Image (cartoon, coloured by chain):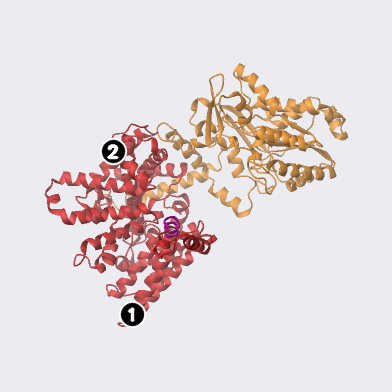
Amino acid sequence: MPNRNSILRCGYLLPRVLLLWALLDVMLRFAPPQWYTFRMHEFAMITGPHDLGPLRANLTYQNSRAYGDLASLGNCTECREYRPMHIHIDRRGFANPASSAPYDAILVGDSFGIGAEQPGDATLSSQISQRTGLSIYNACSPIRSISRESLMVLIDQLGMSHGIVFFELMDASLSYPRTTQEDPGFEGFDRWSRNVQYSPLSNVSRELVGRLYDGRLLPNPYSVNVVRHILPNGRPILFQLYDLRDATSDAVPSWVKYFRVLNKELRQRNFRLIVILVPSKYTVYQPLIKDAPKTNKSEAFEELQKRLKDMPVVNTTAALQQAAAEGIEHGSLLYWRDDTHWNGDGVRVAADQLQVQYASDFVSSGSAKVTAVSQKRPR
Amino acid sequence: MLFNSRVFLFVFLPVVYFVFWRLSSRQLRYIWLTVAGYVFYSFWNYKFCALMAFSTLVSYAAGIGFLRFREGLRRRLCLIIPIVVDLSLLGFFKYFKFWNFAMSSGEWIASLWGMEGGSSLLWKFHLHSLLWNKDLLEGALLPVGISFYTFHTISYIVDSYRGTIKPTTNIFEFACYVALFPQLVAGPIVRFRQVENDLEHLDAANRCSGLDIGWSYFVIGLIKKVLIADTIAAVINAGLGSFSSLGTAGAWLCALGYTYQIYFDFSGYSDMAVGLAHMFGIRLPQNFNSPYKALDPSDFWRRWHISLSTCLRDYLYVPLGGNRSGMYRNLLITMLLGGIWHGANWTFLVWGGYHGALLMLYKRLGEPWDALPTLVRRAAMFLLSIIGWVIFRADSFTMAAQWLAKMFYPTSGYMFTGAVALAACIAVAAVIAHAAPNTFEMSHQWSPQVACALAAGLMCCLVMITGGQRSPFLYFQF
């Protein structure tokens, strides 16, 4: 029989377990995020700032053993690849080195453009920068690119009077209706409530629970979202189920319309728009996999390129598909084995393609500053 | 808001608890608990708070009417009108889809009315355009917990009419009773007389006396729900997802799994509700008394969802005539309505009918059954309840028939992921359900070692709650 004054009785002990849990959760919010996250992406997006950028401002995320999510989701622990991740989020909430201003160009895009799980010098903006000599501001945002209005505000904030806007468009964007271009950032109460709801301790718990629900001991409810195929070299490769979707019928016309409006607006500001079309992992590897159903996204990209013939468009699909086929022979991939994003090799192929198509433009086009910067900063 | 959610555990409960015990007057405590109940309810759909408030006001007014009109037509109207209102709301929100489906698929209303061909189609079209296509009815059709609070209010009205209780004149006391958050959305179905004394003395409640027992009940319930029921659910839901390829072993595992899942889920919720109420100085009645230890169908219904079965007995079976006249008919009607109370689904109706038939058979063949050894009766009753749960869980009659066929005719098939873990969970659940004392048989005066074990269990639950997908309680849908 417990003593009423004993601390080892339910009425005393159990509420304190809850209190301890809550305190631990609060304390962890002040700890480095790499302690309780496996990569920067989701953490920085949820706890991000209110203004332009989607990510948590003034954050340096350093993780020597970052990894992708598909391996866990798809019950393929042998697919996991650990890699170092070092990324700095600036005061606007975008992934940029501590200081790179003044800028010659802005890269707009999604998580492929941000450089999810890439070291800083392997991101698309860095690779383009290395090839062109341009100083590029990375304004990419997870999930979908920032709105046109936000881009104009950003241009003003950066004090740019002219330059280039690279727009990276992933083919998965063609699979959902592009209605209004909304910022991925959350506003007001929604953001506040998300930040309150965000729990570092939940991340740790998820990791523990994930080990139980691993598809062997207990069923993994998330595995339905991942598709597993075998490459010609016999190794497994994982895809997001979402990547297997076709482009919607109105995707191309709506993006054409969007790019035309954006191009016009940018021209008025002495900016040039260059569109970079990036295929998803599935689009790149599907031709190499026996019996893998084909999507219409390659054709959609071709159609988009054809209809935007009056502006520079770099379609990296063919180059990535070819490089992927060659890489398979050497056992290398252009996309992370355990994630949907491309790795440094994939980024390099895309940047090379851009260089092949438009190298001369960067030194000879109307932008004098670009030329000057290019000469000033040989890489 | 679920009892097993972070917002409930870390925000709602602490705030409600600390403010409640800061308030000294009974009236303020009623108001506070009422406000808390409405806030708790609004987390599902704040619009339906108005529905609950309306139901509360109508029932309260009926109580006042009973105080005013001691006899005669007016008194009877005070009984009939609020019950009709409550049942209409329940019928509309809970069973609308069901009747519409029944009518549109079976065309039986049309044939009943002698309409054929074009007339029948016209009827169906009219019905659809009139009712089904309203935005109001899409998605937001079922206010959570409506079956429970409707029973609360109806039991209050009937008990007041019968003179079993004296209706309260304090609207806050009554609103507090209806909106008492521990039992608001999934029971137990508490009758006013069962908590009247505690409510009347809410200002004299002792915070310390209910704390140990309250937390003990709550955490035991949480462990039953999160660690046992949810683990079983994760496996059998995946297994039943590919039901057609299941073999006999898989079908049995799923049937056994669901049998224990529904018990641990619902009794876990009930324990948590009882524990929470204790923390606020209110004692809720027992809802489960080791039902899988039952020896016969009557015994089962004395042990399973006691608050529902006693309500059905007192407010339906007995008024229908009970054992006095038409016992078999009364049993069947009561159990059919008890089945359909669980939701707008034919399988629930058949499940009710199945249990009604079991009760009828037992009434008829009780003597030879009772002559059997205890162990045999207990095992046979458990088997019968498993068959019932298969009907209850199945999405359709076809599935139920196939599931039972797979169980009783050897069929080869695949074994789903997690079968070993499920078998282990079932073994643990079986020991607890068949051999261990239930929560009301425990003293809850735990030794420090047991208290530490409960703390460890709570930690495990927190990991599962915050790290996994939150699983709603099964009885929220009823």
- Compared to B53, does A344 lie above or below? above
Percent x, y of residue B344: 40, 56
Mark yes or no: residue A13 visible. no
Q: Nearer the viewer, residue B222 or A266?
A: A266
- Residue at left 61%, top 16%? A330
Q: Which mark is residue B75?
A: 1
Q: Please give left or right for residue A358 compared with residue B331 in the image.
A: right
For the residue marked with disc 1, what is the amino acid?
A: Arg
**Label 2 or label 1, whichever comes before in sequence order:** 1
Q: How many marks?
A: 2
- Compared to A223, does B117 lie above or below? below
Q: Main secondary structure of the magenta part?
A: helix
Q: Nearer the viewer, residue B234 or B137?
A: B137
Q: Which mark is residue A71?
A: none
For the residue marked with disc 2, what is the amino acid?
A: Ala
Q: Nearer the viewer, residue B409 or B272?
A: B409
- Compared to A328, does B411 lie above or below? below
Q: Please give left or right for residue B399 compared with residue A54 in the image.
A: left
- Same chain for the residues under marks 2 and 1 in the image: yes
Percent x, y of residue B31: 43, 68
Percent x, y of residue A217: 40, 32
Based on the picture, tell me whether residue A122 belongs to the magenta stretch: no
Q: Colour of chain A?
A: orange
Per the rendered image, the range of residues in magenta is B99-106
Q: Nearer the viewer, residue B59 or A298?
A: A298
Chain assigned red: B
- Quickly name the residue at label 2: B427
